Amino acid sequence: MSIQISSLTPGVLVETRAARVSTQPAPGRLSLRARKPALPALGAALGLTLPECIGQRAAGDGTEAICLGPDEWTILTSADLVAGLMAASAGVDQPHSLVDISGREVTLRIDGPRAAELLSLGCPRDIDGIAVGEGRRTVFDGATVVLWRDADNSFRMDIWNSFAPHLAQLLDIGARELAAESA
Amino acid sequence: MSQYRVPGRGRVDTSRPVNFTFDGRSYRGAQGDTVASALLANGVHLMGRSFKYHRPRGAIAAGSEEPNALIGTRRGPGRFEPNTRATVQEIWNGLETTSQNKFPSLKWDVGAVNDAAYMMFSAGFYYKTFMWPKSFWNKVYEPFIRAAAGLGVAPTEEDPDQYASRYLHCDLLIVGAGPAGLAAARAALAEGLKIVMVDENAEPGGTLLSEPQARIDGRPAWDWLAAEIAALKAAGVRIMTRTTAIGYYHQNMLGLCERVTDHLPSLPADTPRERMWRVRARQVVLAQGALEKPLVFHGNDRPGVMLAGAAQTYLNRYGVKVGNAPVVVTSHDSAWYAAFDLQAVGARVQAIVDTRPHVREDLVNEARALGIPVRLSHTVTATSGRLRISGVRVNPVSGATVGAGQQIGCDALLMSGGWTPSLHLFSHTQGKLAWDDDLSTFLPDWTREDCVIAGAGRGLWGIEAALKDGAERGREVAAALGKPGNPVALSVENDRPGSGVSMKELPTDRNPGRAKAFVDYQNDVTAKDLRLAVREGMRSIEHVKRYTTNGMATDQGKMSNINGLNIAADALGRPAPQVGLTTFRPPYTPTTFGAFAGYQRGAHFEVTRKTQIDPWAAANGAVFEPVGQWRRAWYFPKAGEDMEAAVRRECRETRASVGIFDASTLGKIEVVGPDAVTFMERMYTNPWAKLGVGRCRYGLLLGDDGYIRDDGVIGRMAQDRFHVTTTTGGAARVMNMMEDYLQTEWPDLDVWLTSTTEQWSTIALNGPNAAKLLAPFVEGVELTEDAFPHMSCVQCTVAGMPARLFRVSFTGEIGFEVNVPAPMGAALWEILWQAGQQYGIVAYGTETMHVLRAEKGYIIVGQDTDGTVTPFDAGMGWAVGKNKPDFVGKRGLARPDLAAKGRKQLVGLLTEDRSKLEEGAQIVFDPRQPVPMTMVGHVTSSYVSDAVGRPIALALVEGGHDRMGETVHIAMPDRVIAAKITGTVFVDPENSRLKI
């Protein structure tokens, strides 16, 4: 299987009775790095309160943030708001780094009754340890990904573009394997 | 129904017959049979030939510990597996099985001459015999031994099956679903606790499956079992059967191998054959039970000789009587019940031979009541029969005296030397064992893992004892998990507790030195071999093991270890605990490579990273090469072109007009923060402070040893923002190195790194027409020499896409690198490709890129450098900021060795005969010097150069910079090539072609 996966062509990659995997359209995506004292000002500029516990998420008006490390956040927004957020944060005079990574990753939506089990094919982390409404940076099938748990059986997986075909291949195999199991 | 199938016994379904073949002959078994039980039901005991002596062998056990009955199984093309244990493989209609280690047939085997020459093949035989002459080892001895020895035949066809793997996290993992495991699960049950129980058998129950006579809580054992399994499942316990815990790794990580389809008559779609589970459990209960030990006596391997417990399992679980006239020989009470059970179904037990002078009165009385002759204080000294046992020779023992032998006719000999706790997984945890004198065996003592042992695994015997202990251990782990645990009070009737003594080889009235008394059936190791090893000076059990190969077969010494130890300890005259036990290693049972590989095979073998432009390259006939995890377009051959012709054309057309190249794999790091420039000054050799915004510079990165690690062009996008590029292969390494310095050395710097390798698709345009092609698409900057000189960078739009445009050249031609958000790369490529047609644009791959850069003397880190090359060695001292106070590698460069004369330096080479050198070829100054010659360097890069009109090469040569114009010699297998040392720049040394 040599599938090209691009956020420019969202759509369902595989759907079985166990799980569905689909490519999501590209959001605006920013990587924020800063120390703690800068957070209130940056949060104000970005329009949300930045969560300080790794794995926690917060949402603002049209934006969403996840804390991935002690000084690292990913901010999701709509593509046309990226320039505005970059400009707003440039006005914050506390040291920080904001980098547009909208083109870096492709997001797969993984949902369906056995979505969590599907993730256990490639993720050594205990999926049950990720609460609904949280997320984690982890690995899947050997590649670094960010997992967002949106519901018990609905996840988003952010994958660097070049790894996506390989990871999608395992998700495809797994969705069929799990479906055969529950047949 | 065959005469050995016992109606009304066993759990197999005789109303559902199953046909399979063994060595081409068709047999009928019942649903639920293993190959072994089905063959035994047909009266077939002979199932294989042994490894070394090719002795006829039958199944000796009924489970995964079986050392003898190894067969090949086949299910159509590619689906052949050697060394499958017949005692584990379940039968299905159409299963093909074959015996192993025989020629021409199982019943008449040529290799059995080894058996006649038994006295020759003593311990260390190979070491002693095949020593001289030494040169014979590779060509004569080893091939011969390999052909003659070995177990089964390796499959030759590709395995068409899928293999799978999953991770599983649980609070409690119970290994073994026998009485101890079941009771542990029941006792630990609690709301919110995730409990998983695994068992290698086709159904849970363990020893209960072989002991239907027991009554638990007033119910027949099997009724209780069915209800208990249902109740545990209903309570949320996950019970996994046909799943073997193969290894216990650090921090309660266990590997489980699940056999998914081997028992199915047809293969379901999308279903793997096996699945490896990687389980992380907070607590583990090992309830693996105990394995029965054989007794060691002459002829203890004849087909029909079997463990008494196995005979009971065949009878009670599979409904198969292993013989009509069996003899039992034992040193443990448990085997007496095998005799009683067999007698009860119509077999006439010829005798119970017990090595002990005194045996529990109730057992002796029951034997007498059943009319079974009993011989206490007796030994077995021989068996007879060719392909099946026909008789056994028993002798009375009085003190040290063995009396006269007496022959007893039989068709099966059931033996028991007692039971060894199964401590393999416990041993994997590096747990400590303690010797138990009463049981003459090792018991688990202490382990660093969160793990407890329950039941027979710690020497407890009988169903009630196992249930009780399982319940206690279950409550123990529940407490460790913060749960109260449940009381479990179970009463057992018709239990069969017992005890026994542990024996070394049985006493004999004959010469023990000639006895074929097997300790390790699979490796054909006898008691004589072990004693010989000790006589020849082996003192450590580890040496005895390796010298004799005792316990080194695929069964990991499950049956042989304790017997081997007892015999070796006796020979050494030391107590067993002082002699010690060898270490068990994973996997517990032989495991397929497929299970270990899981999904990582075929097209999914490893990550293949592809750029956004990769599909275009594939559609346009690119030949690819792997670069790290990436696959990159190597060259684009046209019809009829070989690689050299294609690369020559790509080079020529690029230098003549314009070439387009996918450079997306280049590593990219965004360095942002008020201290960005300070950080860059410290990381790279070059000065950055004065680099203006909108300018870029070639950067060189050293390790702290002063050697070149990476390089790339770096642009200053803003006062506090750098766009760093790295080599394709070095991207992650450089990022890690920078993070490392930032976090450990300079945590005070306000600067952050973000990997942007995959944010951008990078398209390189090179050639005299590059600017002309690109200019119409660019908004925000004019592509003129004044407005956008060489080594500039800018944010602009290209074809309406937001872009970072760099004017850089890795070819010596006018060059641009256009970065656009990655998903847009394919579209931009197509636009430039179409617009380039008017200029005769050529798409080129990595090979042409390499040639073009070599013609200009630009190095490739990792090809022209090897981790021992300094910037000065590479002729790039100009890249080192001499006035900088510090940078990574500055102190390394100051080491005397790195500044010394005579270092290997990068130079160009032109061969006198205009031949192309081989990369990696060694260089000498004087080809007439005696061998071994003094090597003074090697060729690092070598290409046919269309622009130069002859092949060119780069090389590292001792003191090369001071040897311009000198001739060196490259020794090849067929000739010596002379070459002249030149500078590294072969094309346009004045850089006049860079100008627009």
Image (spheres, rainbow, N blue to C red):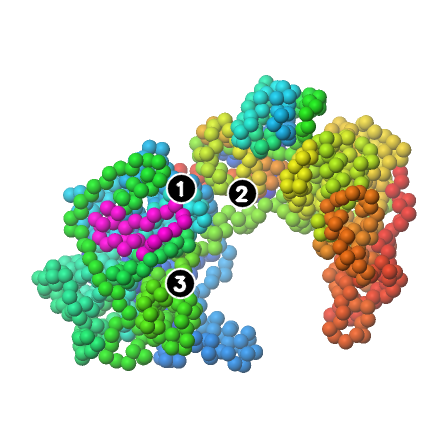
Q: Which residue is mark 1?
A: B282
The residue under label 2 is which amino acid type? Asp
Q: What element does badge 1 sit on?
A: strand
Pick the quarter of the image with the N terminus of chain B. Answer: bottom left
Q: CA distance from mark 2 to mark 1?
A: 24 Å
Chain ID, mark 2: A
B455 inside magenta stretch: yes
Do we see residue A15 in this rendering? Answer: yes
Q: Same subunit under labels 2 and 1?
A: no
Q: Are marks 3 and 2 in contact (CB under 8 Å)?
A: no
**Mark 2, mark 1: which one is toward the viewer?**
1
Q: Which residue is mark 3?
A: B582
Q: Which mark is residue B369?
A: none
Nearer-the-camera pick, B611 or B291: B291
Q: What element does badge 3 sit on?
A: loop
Q: CA distance from mark 1 to mark 3?
A: 28 Å
Name the quadrant containing residue B46: bottom left
The residue under label 1 is which amino acid type? Arg
x and y percentages locating residue B385 in the rendered image = 26, 74
Q: Residue at x 39, y 45 (%)?
A: B450
Do we see residue B61 in this rendering? Answer: no
Q: Extreme left residue here?
A: B369
Q: Residue at x 80, y 34 (%)?
A: B793
B228 inside magenta stretch: no
